[in-house]
Image (spheres, rainbow, N blue to C red):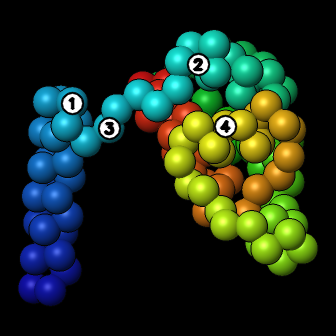
Amino acid sequence: MFNERKRNTFIFVKSSIREKMIKGKLFQKMYSREQIQAYLERIRFQGELELTKEMLDKLIYAHQTAIPFENLDVYEFHKKISLKPEALFQKMVTHRRGGYCLEMNGLFGYMLQSMG
């Protein structure tokens, strides 16, 4: 019975998120086409952007191999970390640096939202 209730709750949550996505209330595009292209060049992504699991796997792999984990700002320079989309883009794409775990995941998430 617990598994059945849990599964139904999950379906309810998914459908409510889907409704918000359809209405455009949940996700907004963060980056322009030019910024998306610069990101794809930064991670050396080759191929067409299609909504498939295979493409997502390729994007994840490219992101992980091109943008290194880096925590210099936190430990060496004692800087505060900004998780704003523009700050993440500037640091990891424009300045070609790495990022802290939250920065790297934030950039990747914002890119996926912007790609649609």
The mark found on residue 83 in the picture is: none
Q: Crowding at label 1, few (<14), some or many (≥20) Cα neighbours within 10 Å?
A: few
Identify the element where label 4 is drawn: helix
Query: Are the residues at dot 3 and dot 2 in contact (C-beta closer than 8 Å)?
Result: no
Q: Quadrant of the N terminus?
A: bottom left
The mark found on residue 89 in the picture is: 4
Query: Are the residues at dot 3 and dot 4 in contact (C-beta closer than 8 Å)?
Result: no
Tell which circle, 3 or 2, labels the residue nearer the N-terminal end.
Answer: 3
Identify the element where label 2 is drawn: loop
Q: CA distance from mark 1 to mark 4?
A: 23 Å
Query: Are the residues at dot 2 and dot 1 in contact (C-beta closer than 8 Å)?
Result: no
At x 34%, y 32%, the residue is 28
Marker count (numbered) = 4
Tell which circle, 2 or 1, labels the residue nearer the N-terminal end.
Answer: 1
Q: Amino acid at mark 2?
A: Leu
Mark 3 or mark 2, whichever is nearer to me: 3
At x 14%, y 48%, the residue is 15
Residue that numbered label 3 is attached to: 27
Residue that numbered label 1 is attached to: 24
At x 25%, y 42%, the residue is 26
Q: CA distance from mark 2 to mark 1?
A: 21 Å
Tell which circle, 3 or 4, labels the residue nearer the N-terminal end.
Answer: 3
The image quadrant that residue 33 belongs to is: top right
Q: Quadrant of the C terminus?
A: top left
Mark 3 or mark 4, whichever is nearer to me: 4
Residue that numbered label 2 is attached to: 49
The image quadrant that residue 85 belongs to is: top right
